[in-house]
Amino acid sequence: MSHAIRLVLAAGLALGLAACQKAEEAKPAEQPAAAPAPVLTTPTDGNPEAWKAFLAQELRPHVDRRYRRPFVYFIPDVVADAPDAAEQQRQYDSQLENIQNTIGRGVQAGSMLAFGGPNSTKVGDVIVESFALAGPKSLKGVRVVVIAKPEERARIEAAVLPTEPDFIWVDIK
C-alpha cells in the first residue's frame, strides 16, 4: 500500500473518531423519568376543559404513525334551562356545521376523527346527522373514534360503518 493511501486512510479514521467523540459530547445528560400523568375519570359535569382533557386521554392510545392527523370534536351539551343556554346552542350548532362540512367534503386517508362530549345523545345526534352526508366507503383509510355511552353505540355504528373507516368505540360510564 502506498504511503499516500495510508495517509488518506489514517486521516479518514481520525475524522471518524473525532466525529464519534463529538456525538458523545453532544448527547444530553439523562433526565430523570417524568412522573406518570394522572388518570382522569369521566367528568361528572359539562365543564368543557375537563371534558377536553378526558377526551385527549382516551384518544391517546388510538393515535399511531398510520393515523397522525387527529381532529377531535368536542360536542357541547345544551341544557335548555341553563343561564347560557343560547350560547350552548350556538356552540353546538357551530360544531355540527363544522363536522358536516368536514364529512361532506371528504376526509384524507391517514386522518383521525374523534368525537365525544358530556351528553352522549348529543354526540350521537351530531354523528348521525353528519355521516348522512358521507357516501358509502368514503372514509376508507380514516380512523373514527367515538367516546360515548354504550347506549348510543348501535345508532352511531349504523351511521358510521357504511363509510368503512377504521372504527373504534370507547365506552364511558
Image (tube, rainbow, N blue to C red):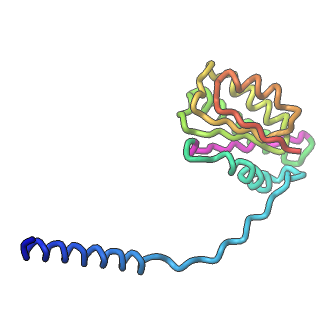
Count how many numbered circles sit on residues in the image.
Answer: 0
Residue sitting at x 58%, y 42%: 67
Q: In the image shown, does 167 or 98 lie closer to the viewer?
A: 167
Figure quadrant of the C terminus: top right
Residue at 70% x, 25% y is: 161
67 vs 32: above or below:
above
Q: Nearer the viewer, residue 59 or 97?
A: 59
41 lies above or below 8: above
> Is residue 74 shown in magenta?
yes
Identify the magenta region: 67-80
Quarter containing the N terminus? bottom left
> Which residue ends up furthest to the top in the rendered image?
136
Residue 29 coordinates in the image, percent (x, y): 53, 80
Locate residue 126 relative to residue 133 in the image: left or right. Answer: right
Decide which of 115, 11 is in the foreground and name it: 11
Closer to the camera in the image, 166 or 13: 13
**Position in image of residue 15 (x %, y %):** 25, 76
Q: Is residue 122 left or right of residue 160?
A: right
Q: Where is residue 44 drawn, in percent x and y?
A: 90, 52
Q: Residue at x 78, y 64 (%)?
A: 38
Residue at 63% across, 47% down: 63
Query: In the figure, 133 relative to 55: above or below?
Result: above
Q: Which picture quadrant has residue 131?
A: top right
Toward the right, the furthest residue is 81
Residue 120, percent across and down?
Answer: 84, 38
- Residue 86: in sight, yes or no? no
Q: Identify whether 87 is placed above or below 35.
A: above
Q: Is residue 50 magenta?
A: no
